[in-house]
Amino acid sequence: MKGGKMDKNGNRIRLILLAIVLQVLISPFYLFSQGDNCNKPNRCPNKKYPYFNCEDGGTICLDNPTSPPVMIPFDWPICIDYVRNSDNPGNVEMFYQPGVIRVFSEDEETLNASLNCALNSWHCLCNKEKEPSKCRIKLRWSKNKDDFRPNPNYVFATARRYYSRATCKVACSDQAETEILFNNSKAFHGEWKSWENKVYYTKFFYNIPEQWKNLQPFQDYNPNVISFCDVLTHEIGHIFGLSHYLKDDGKTPMCGSGNESIGIMDPYADNNRWWAFNKETVGLSDDDKCAFMKLMCPSFLYVEPSKPSANVKPGLDLNPLDNNLFVIFEWDKIEKVSLELFDVFGNRILSNLITTNIGTNNFSFNDLRLVNGFYFIKISNVRKVILFKGVVVVR
């Protein structure tokens, strides 16, 4: 179900979720202090992005990711534990004219720069790049092509998310199995023998300066390299709950016509630079940034408001100067319902069992002293059937 709209059980709800302004409104163009180290977008379009749905393991398309447990919340920022074993590539060299060039290095300084390149791409969007890490994710290599089915020849890496079905929280302790797995199988990197019978990879990742860009391949050997930082950035995006923009055919938008997106989370696009192995870095697009910030730090970003549906009164996205908020909704019978409030990380901060009246109902949040940000409401019946999910904005 999409935030701000009713699900199939919601035909009993006629007016839902009205944020009441008791003082002067803040300008809708106001932005929280962001800095410019990430070239953050000032605003994001009212378009749907695909997110991981932990309720069924699939993908859900939302213009505003509003309702836990749709997403996978967890404590962040994250750090990467680089696992070293016999499957690791070590230092990788490729053959160019006039000689051999090292493209991947496992020395600590180069490796740390590669990891920070990917992590900070996401962290700095929410001003988290200087905060201590709270979640540890493993990164390891595998020579087993079966780990990268159905296309071990082309799958760069894969993210494996382990999480609680009960809470939808990612498992990210020291012992957790949530990990990012990079492809070091022969099916992926290939091999080429020089006239000296030395073996070189035909395709691999690079994590050092691109000194080979102006060099020429030798005869039939045409080495291709892919940015390690870009691939890791993509897989971290999956850990955070972002999905691919396009379906596996590389053409059909995951979220339907009119919602085409492109960027680091789009590995299937025909015009995606990294798929062509032409040694260009990709980096985050505005679509990547918007999809992430809407999910992880929506209060940092002005989002163009959705047009009110026929069942929701205008004013849904009003931003009061104080924390005097209450929800107003209409119900068609007397029954007990559960009203829950969550923060953006999925932490439940309120759970109340209330008895509805026939007609107008209201519930106040005044006692919670809410800080600035987005909060998510869920209303369900005693059978735990979700009747409504929506968002409240406090600024």
Image (cartoon, rainbow, N blue to C red):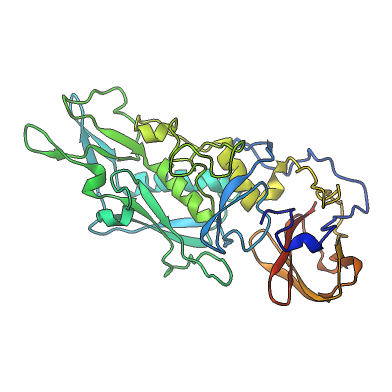
49 vs 31, left or right, is left
User: Where residue 201 appears, x then y in whole percent?
Assistant: 21, 40
User: Where residue 217 appears, x then y in whole percent?
Assistant: 21, 26
Specify the farthest residue to the right. Answer: 23
223 vs 76, left or right, is left
Count of numbered badges drawn on the protein: 0
Q: Quadrant of the N terminus?
A: bottom right
User: Where residue 14 appears, x then y in whole percent?
Assistant: 84, 58
User: Where residue 170 appears, x then y in whole percent?
Assistant: 52, 64
What residue lies at 81% left-to-right and 61% top-to-bottom?
13
Specify the farthest residue to the left. Answer: 196
Q: Is residue 230 above or below residue 83?
A: above
Q: Quadrant of residue 216?
A: top left
What residue lies at 35% left-to-right and 29% top-to-bottom?
278
Q: Quadrant of residue 351?
A: bottom right
Residue 190 seen: yes
Residue 377 seen: no
153 vs 218, left or right, is right
What residue lies at 78% left-to-right and 73% top-to-bottom?
337
